Image: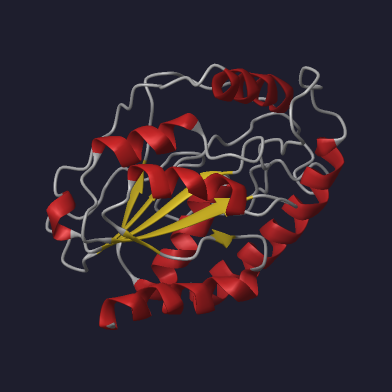
Amino acid sequence: MKQKLSLALALALTLSLAACGNQAGGGSTPPAGTPPSTPPASSAVTPEPSETAGTPDNTPAAAGDSGILIAYFGVPETDGTDTVANASRVATENGVAGNCQFIAQAIQQAVGGDLFAIETVQEYPGTHQPLLDFAYEELRQNARPELSSAIENLDNYSVIFLGYPNWWDEAPAMIAIFLAENELSGKVVAPFCTSSYSSIDNSLHIFRELASGAAVAEGLTANDQSTIRPWVDQVMAQLER
């Protein structure tokens, strides 16, 4: 299973890089004066066999025995039927899901832990251009979408990997809500994002602002398979300091 997961991840991320680079030129143009931005990363992943295609993980272990939580938000895009050329989706024998879900599963394969999908009451467009436009307006208006999923046993976790798509060079609004609504003091928080060409760096300010009591690890832009395991090991090493 790990070998299959690694091969699928390598394919998914490679295709996602090519697709996102092409999509960037076709997105909406922000109003004059808006800084350079990054459109949502495309969805190109392979879920575990036990999952329904496109269905997020909503089952963190009741006891949180590992002490590790892998939380993520993502919107798998549904447009496009050629999943190889389009690469907004990658279909395999196990189904289709979003990039962030796949990266979260890769982290779980590397270090264990419990998966948790951050969900909102607000439904997001499932096609690329409407999603691109909606994400821009949400960030421009400083929207605060209501979360529809919650972690009941947060005290059992000492490490939280937190993933999201890099929308317009920022973390989506619900990531700020997640940070504000959960007490993370004393925990290690490790941000990761999916993006074809923009670094996670510009989005990290919300962690300094809203998770000041946590030890925030160096963020990862998850566009290279070879960086995932070393980054995970670096995060876990913080617990030993």
Q: Foreground residue, 42 or 139? A: 139
Q: Is residue 16 visible?
A: yes
| Total marks placed | 0
Task: Tell me: residue 42, above or below residue 145.
Answer: below
Q: Is residue 105 left or right of residue 183?
A: right
Q: Is residue 219 left or right of residue 217?
A: right
Q: Residue at x 51, y 39 (%)?
A: 74
Q: Position of residue 144 (x, y in %)?
A: 41, 22
Q: Residue at x 64, y 43 (%)?
A: 43
Q: Position of residue 52 (x, y in %)?
A: 45, 42
Q: Quadrant of residue 20?
A: top right
Question: Quarter of the image containing the C terminus?
Answer: bottom left
Q: How is the image coloured?
A: secondary structure
Q: Is residue 198 left or right of residue 86?
A: left
Q: Position of residue 238 (x, y in %)?
A: 34, 76
Q: Foreground residue, 181 or 154? A: 181
Q: Position of residue 138 (x, y in %)?
A: 55, 20
Q: Residue at x 33, y 70 (%)?
A: 112
Q: Is residue 72 visible?
A: no
Task: Tell me: residue 169, above or below residue 66.
Answer: above
Q: Foreground residue, 19 or 7? A: 19
